[in-house]
Amino acid sequence: MTQRNPLNSRYQSDEKLGKTRKSAAAAKPSTKAAATVCAAPPKTKKEKRAEEAARARKIRARQLPQQRDAQFNVPTPEYKRVRRLWWIVLITAIVLVTVSFLLTKVPGVPVELSTVILVIAYAFIIYAIYLDVGKTRKLRRAYQVAVLNNKSKAIRAEQKRMHAQNVEAARKRAEQPEEAPTPRKGVFARLFGKKK
């Protein structure tokens, strides 16, 4: 309520008038210190294995585009020659189609010339499709098979070394006793905690 007349006697005293209502927040129980902080329970062996498997899947997913690039960018000279020829044929076909359509706009040029150039362009397009679908695909497949079935001594030695490493790591994990999980420390405890 507003003060109507400051000269009124009820507004001239220095006493506190009325009383204020306490807020609803004061009625709520106060929270204990760090009651909302939840420490993650230690992970079981099964959860750790699942995490490692997920990590391995992510690594494989990252390597997949690189493997795809290796399959489609075959480094053999024959493949490069066929691919270069494909680009030349395709660009020539595009140029011929453009010339054919431009000749229809020029007065005095017979329509038959434009049609002949367009037929030649279509022949180039069909040849480009043949090069892409036929020859380059065969070369790519042959390269893939050669890479997958590569049995050179160096590759076999590398495969054996990797297998031995995996066996050794599995043996060490099996021998290692299960460690008691260490309690996780907060950020400030790590920064200002005691040094050992």
Image (tube, grey):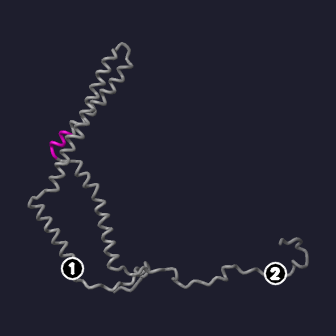
Residue plotted at (22% across, 48% down): 73
Instruction: Read off the magenta span.
Output: 76-82
Disc 2 + disc 1, Cβ < 8 Å: no
Residue plotted at (34% across, 17% down): 111
Q: Which residue is mark 2?
A: 18
**Is 8 displayed left or right of 185 in the figure?**
right
Residue positioned most to the left: 153
Image coords of residue 9 (percent x, y): 91, 79
Image coords of residue 86 (percent x, y): 23, 37
Image coords of residue 196 (percent x, y): 33, 87
For the residue carrying disc 2, how many other residues have a C-alpha within 10 Å: few (<14), some (14-19), or many (20+)? few
**Is 27 displayed left or right of 103 in the figure?**
right
Residue plotted at (23% across, 81% down): 174
Disc sitting over residue 185 in the figure: none
Tell me the kind of residue under disc 1: Lys
Tell me the kind of residue under disc 2: Gly
Q: Is residue 52 above or below residue 15?
A: above
Task: Name the main secondary structure of what is drawn in magenta.
Answer: helix
For the residue carrying disc 1, how many other residues have a C-alpha within 10 Å: few (<14), some (14-19), or many (20+)? few
| Quadrant where the N terminus is found in the figure | bottom right
Q: CA distance from mark 2 to mark 1?
A: 78 Å
Residue 79 in the magenta stretch? The answer is yes
Residue plotted at (28% across, 62% down): 60
Q: Is residue 77 above or below residue 63?
A: above
Q: Is residue 32 above or below residue 150?
A: below
Earlier-in-chain disc, 2 versus 1: 2
Q: Which residue is mark 1?
A: 172
Residue 39, image quadrant: bottom left
Image coords of residue 191 (percent x, y): 41, 79
